[in-house]
Image: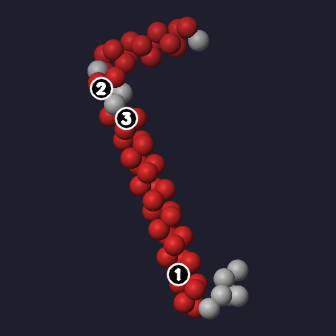
Amino acid sequence: MLEQFSTDTQFIIVIAIIAVLFLLVFFNNKRNKRKRYDRKNRNFRRNFYEKKQNKKED
């Protein structure tokens, strides 16, 4: 696929793809941390009983 480009251009394209993948992983990790740490002030008991209530309703 990259054979049509020169070796310098191939190198630049590969570095750009790796950078984009790194940024995607970084932002996904940041989003997951925010979802996990901001979960209703991390009160286990309240979260547990709310989940239990939701399961009964379903």
Amino acid on which the number 2 mark rests in the picture: Arg
Callout 1: SS:
helix
Q: Earlier in the sequence, mark 2 or mark 1?
A: 1
**Residue 45: mark in rendering:** none
Which residue has dot 1 on it?
12
- Residue identified by numbered label 3: 36
How crowded is the residue under tag 2: few (<14 C-alpha within 10 Å), some, or many (20+)?
A: few
Q: Residue at x 33, y 14 (%)?
A: 46
How has the structure been colored for display? secondary structure
Distance from disc 2 to disc 3, alpha carbons, whole Å, reads: 8 Å
The residue at which mark 2 appears reads as: 42
Q: CA distance from mark 2 to mark 1?
A: 44 Å
Q: Earlier in the sequence, mark 3 or mark 1?
A: 1
Q: Nearer the viewer, mark 3 or mark 1?
A: 1
Instruction: State how many labels appear.
Output: 3
Look at the numbered discs 3 and 1 and tell me whether their residues touch, using CB distance below 8 Å.
Answer: no
Q: Is residue 41 left or right of residue 52?
A: left
- In the picture, the quarter occupied by the C terminus is top right
Residue 18 locus on image (x, y percent):
49, 70
Q: Secondary structure at mark 3?
A: helix
Give the residue displayed 52% in from the left and 14% down from the top: 55
Decide if residue 58 is on the left or right side of residue 42: right
